[in-house]
Image (spheres, helix red, strand yellow):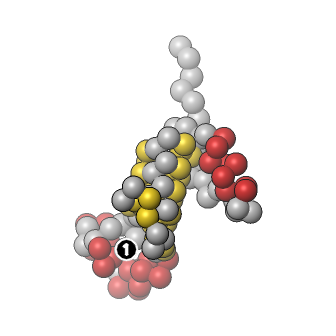
Amino acid sequence: MDDALAALTPAQRELLMRAGVRRRSANEFLGLPWYHVALGPDPARGQSRGHAKGVIAVGGAAVGHYAIGGAPSGTYVAGPERVDRAVFDLFASAGLEVPMPPVRPPARAR
């Protein structure tokens, strides 16, 4: 368990343990699950935030063809630094809303 989780009270840890979400498809494509959702902490794995890898990945650090998170990496991403329209189109076609992390305002020109 990392330092951030260790500093919490037992009641706070219990609340966070219930807040984490992990979902992964059983089917794979090129060795990656079709989707992997890793939101919130996972104390059993010693993670204070999610680490998702998949064709479609959603979490704190997400790697996939479509990736959504605080630190996404992929062909089409939605994160603080960049938001690609293709991510919104994919989710809309499935009747879903894109869970967006906070977006940082662009740096001002000098």
Nearer to the camera, 29 or 47: 29
Q: Is residue 104 visible?
A: no
User: Residue 94 at what x, y percent from top left?
Assistant: 70, 61
The location of residue 89, given as percent across then percent down, is 70, 48
Q: Which residue sits at x=43%, y=64%?
A: 28
Q: Nearer the viewer, residue 70 or 84?
A: 84
Q: Quadrant of residue 50?
A: bottom left
Q: Is residue 89 above or below residue 42?
A: above
Residue annotated with mark 1: 42
Q: Is residue 46 visible?
A: yes
Which amino acid lies under the numbered mark 1 shown in the image of this protein?
Answer: Asp
Up/down of 84 relative to 38, above or below: above
Disc 1, SS: loop
Instruction: Identify the image quadrant of residue 53.
Output: bottom left
Left or right, 95 with respect to 87, comes to right
Residue lying at 35% horizontally and 85% vertically, measured from the top left? 10
Residue under the point 54% across and 27% down: 107
Tell me how many marks there are: 1
Q: Nearer the viewer, residue 86 or 51?
A: 86
Which of the 4 image quarters holds residue 45? bottom left
Q: Looking at the rendering, in which quadrant would you find the N terminus?
A: bottom left
Residue furthest top as drawn: 110
The residue depicted at 25 percent of the width and 67 percent of the height is: 2
Q: For label 1, count other residues whose C-alpha is less than 10 Å away and answer few (under 14), some (14-19) or many (20+).
A: many
Relative to residue 16, is residue 9 drawn left or right?
left
Find residue 69 and report its horizontal and vertical position in percent. Answer: 50, 53
Asked if 63 appears above or below 38 in the picture, the reply is: above
Residue 104 spot, x, y in % from top left: 55, 40
